[in-house]
Amino acid sequence: MTVHVHGHVYVYVYGMLGFLTGDKIMGKTNQGMTRTLAEFIVNTRVSDIPDPVFEHAKVAFMDWLGVTLAGKDQPLVDKLLRYCDTLGGNEQATILGRGMKKSVTQVALINGAASHALDYDDTLSAFIGHPTVTLFPGLLALSQWQGKSGAELLAAYLIGIKVGVTIGISAGSGHYAAGYHATCTIGCLASAAACSRLLELDMQQTVYALGIGGTQSAGLKQVFGTMCKPFHAGRASEVGVTAALLAQDGFTSAEDILEGASGFFSALGGEVNERALETLGKTWHMETLAQKYHASCHGTHSALEAAREIFADHHVSMDDVRAIRVITSDVAVGAAFRNEAATGLEGKFCIAYCVINALMREGTGLEAFTDERVMDPEIQENMRKVTVVTDQEITGMAARVEVETVGGDVFETFSDIFSQIPELEEKKTRIRAKFKDVTSSYLSDERSDDIADVISRLESVEDMADFIERL
């Protein structure tokens, strides 16, 4: 692959609702945003994508595969398997970690839901959600079925990310604030874009696929903390596969699904952002893709990091604490919305639990989010010391934490985990360690290292069906 260097500067406002700076422009490009994106999907060459971007994509794949295997035994996966058994279908692709095959759409649904079930997957600010769990499940299923290569898989993923980000920037903060879960609403379109690319659809077919995906965009934040949140990721993956397969057969749809008078932006909020469109093929956003190192909603991470920093810097213990005050954004509280927690799942969306757990225990990974851990009486008692309030001046997922001691001292610090994303080489090291940790009950250390080594050279895998066989 050839590295292409582009002299284009892209400025982020870090946070869950990060978007391209500059005024949004009403209207549309000369040919419309939908067709402009379709041209990008169809015409982008693998050699147009810089090598470091592919390296980031392989890190994302390893992280996604790890959390998918870790989530394979969650109750919602069993329920989705029973649902698919009821429907029947051709055995075309593999349910990861389950040793069985289902149709490509069913596999996209189940693997997608499994990968988001533990809420341990990545987030991208400008996408306004969790991109990877909407893309790799459908792409891997299609790649196994159609014998696609690792390079084709990665390129389709990166193109899907870019399409999703461009739509996310145009949708803006109002989309998420209105109650839409962008992982699904925008994810359906991103997945349709990625699957269209993988199946090598032509321009007209790709336009239709975006229309088919866009008209199925759905997902409400009201269901956070239930099985429906990970179901959103699975549905977005499934929709993308369905959209591409139907469009490949000439199934028609609107040709202006995004910018049309009754299209995506009109119905769900936003407007065409010309500046975002101008970055197509120039920026790829992977350096701002944030993997998780705590197994909870990203809305909890800045708060727990800030609290830990105070305890470490000022040698504070829980016995010293009178009160902890978390000041964060409306966006963070909208995502991590639970004031109390009684189950492991609820704990993932409870800032108070995540902060106290991080201060009283070493682990913030999967082991921290069991019903028993959450309901520990000492943890529950100390959670009462935590107050969470919002501040309009704080954006994204940032948080300021104040700790008041029984002696009257007050310590405070600020954290924004989206401005502290590790560089590529550190990401590689941390995600490889995370992969080994989350798959330890499924893979031996030797098998984990073997698979991680293959992923590190995924672009050289000629047939992804062979990769699946290694699992």
Image (cartoon, rainbow, N blue to C red):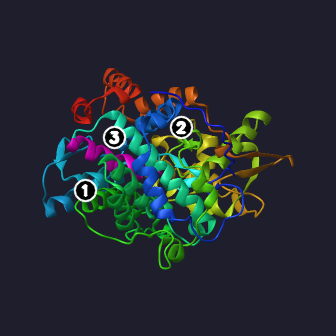
The residue sitting at 35% across, 64% down in the picture is 208
Asked whether 216 or 276 is in front, the reply is 276
- Give residue 275's position: percent from left, percent from top: 64, 56
Foreground tag (2 vs 1) = 1
- Element type at mark 3: helix
Whole-angstrom CA distance, mark 2 to mark 1, is: 36 Å
**Residue 146 left/right relative to 203:** left
- Give residue 224's position: percent from left, percent from top: 48, 64
Foreground tag (1 vs 3) = 1
User: Is the Cβ of the residue at disc 1 closer than 8 Å to that at disc 3?
Assistant: no
The residue sitting at 31% across, 48% down in the picture is 200
Whole-angstrom CA distance, mark 1 to mark 3, is: 19 Å
Q: Label 1, on which residue? A: 105
Q: Going from the N terminus, do you reach mark 2 or mark 1 first? A: 1
- Element type at mark 1: helix
The residue sitting at 48% across, 31% down in the picture is 55
Asked whether 276 or 13 is in front, the reply is 276
Q: Residue furthest right?
A: 408
Vertical relation: 1 (above or below) 181: above
Q: Residue furthest front?
A: 30
- Give residue 428's position: percent from left, percent from top: 51, 28
Whole-angstrom CA distance, mark 2 to mark 3, is: 20 Å
**Residue 109 left/right relative to 221:** left
* Residue 353 seen in render: no
Amino acid beneath label 2: Gly
Q: Label 3, on which residue? A: 69
Q: Label 2, on which residue? A: 363
Which label sits on residue 10? none
Query: Over which residues does the magenta segment extend?
Result: 131-146
